């Protein structure tokens, strides 16, 4: 995913990063508006409205710090997060697919259709001690989570995935990962969150 993001056109970066680090489905990203992305909140979220979320109900998805870094340079008060057609100025799935194909060629990588979501899921599940909360964030069931994503990624490798940022030299010091106890991954202490508690822990 890192190679693909670094090879991507700037118009593609927001939608690609949202899939990779928030785990949204392509169809959910295509319906997403910048007004749904709450970067300025104390606990930033993507608020998927009823008509966009595949679950058919409102779904708040927590924004990881590295995703916030990818999105901040492009953030607007409103408007589609998708690439826009040159003539109509409307969101264009055709342009999205073209820019993604071009990025794959530049990055020299192959990527299945829903690869960003699947990559997020594999690494997120590897860090997640609360399967129900993890499934809720992804808009799926615990059964589907276990069937498709469990044990696909090594927990030792997962923190590095959520450190992929626009500036690779700048460390990511906090994460919003649903775990039930403090852990130390690489050189950082990460945020603690379960479905009822949010307690950010600064890096030491």
Image: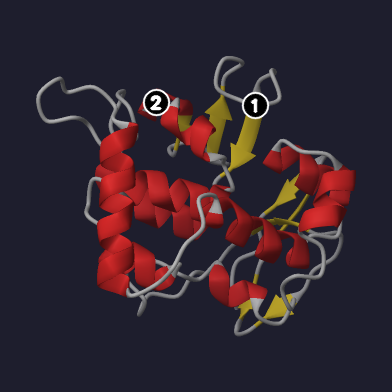
Which of the image's four quarters has the C terminus?
Answer: bottom right
Instruction: Identify the element where label 2 is drawn.
Output: loop
Q: Which of 107 and 5 is in front in this view?
A: 107
Using the numbered discs, state the Cα–Cα distance from disc 1 to disc 2 in whole angstroms: 15 Å
Pointer 2 residue: 33
Packing grade of label 1 (10 A; few <14, some 14-19, many >=20) is some
Q: Please give the count of numbered marks on the rendered protein.
A: 2
Residue ranking furthest to the top? 51
Q: Which residue is drawn at 63% across and 31% down?
A: 60
Residue ranking furthest to the left? 87
Using residue 178 as the reference point, say whether residue 102 is left or right of it.
Answer: left
Q: Nearer the viewer, residue 104 or 198?
A: 104
Residue ranking furthest to the right? 143
Q: Which image quarter: residue 129?
A: bottom right
Q: Residue at x 51, y 57 (%)?
A: 112
> Compared with residue 41, is residue 6 higher up or lower down, i.e. above or below?
below
Pointer 1 residue: 54
Instruction: Identify the element where label 1 is drawn.
Output: loop
Q: Earlier in the sequence, mark 1 or mark 2?
A: 2
Q: Residue at x 39, y 44 (%)?
A: 15
Using residue 141 as the reference point, say whether residue 85 is left or right of it.
Answer: left
Q: Nearer the viewer, residue 186 or 85?
A: 85
């Amino acid at each position: 995913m890192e190679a693909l993001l670094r090879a991507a056109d700037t118009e593609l970066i927001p939608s690609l990063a949202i899939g990779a680090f928030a785990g949204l489905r392509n169809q959910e990203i295509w319906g997403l508006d910048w007004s749904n992305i709450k970067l300025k909140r104390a606990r930033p979220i993507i608020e998927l409205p009823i008509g966009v979320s595949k679950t058919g109900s409102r779904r708040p998805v927590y924004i990881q710090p590295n995703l916030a870094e990818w999105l901040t340079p492009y953030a607007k008060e409103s408007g589609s997060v998708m690439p826009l057609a040159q003539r109509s100025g409307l969101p264009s799935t055709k342009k999205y697919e073209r820019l993604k194909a071009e990025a794959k060629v530049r990055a020299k990588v192959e990527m299945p259709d829903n690869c960003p979501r699947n990559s997020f899921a594999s690494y997120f599940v590897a860090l997640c001690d609360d399967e129900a909360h993890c499934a809720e964030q992804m808009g799926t069931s615990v059964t589907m989570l276990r069937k498709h994503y469990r044990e696909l990624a090594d927990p030792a490798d997962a923190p590095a995935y959520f450190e992929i940022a626009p500036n690779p030299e700048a460390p990511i010091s906090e994460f919003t990962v649903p775990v039930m106890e403090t852990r130390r991954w690489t050189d950082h202490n990460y945020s603690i969150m379960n479905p009822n508690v949010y307690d950010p822990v600064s890096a030491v």
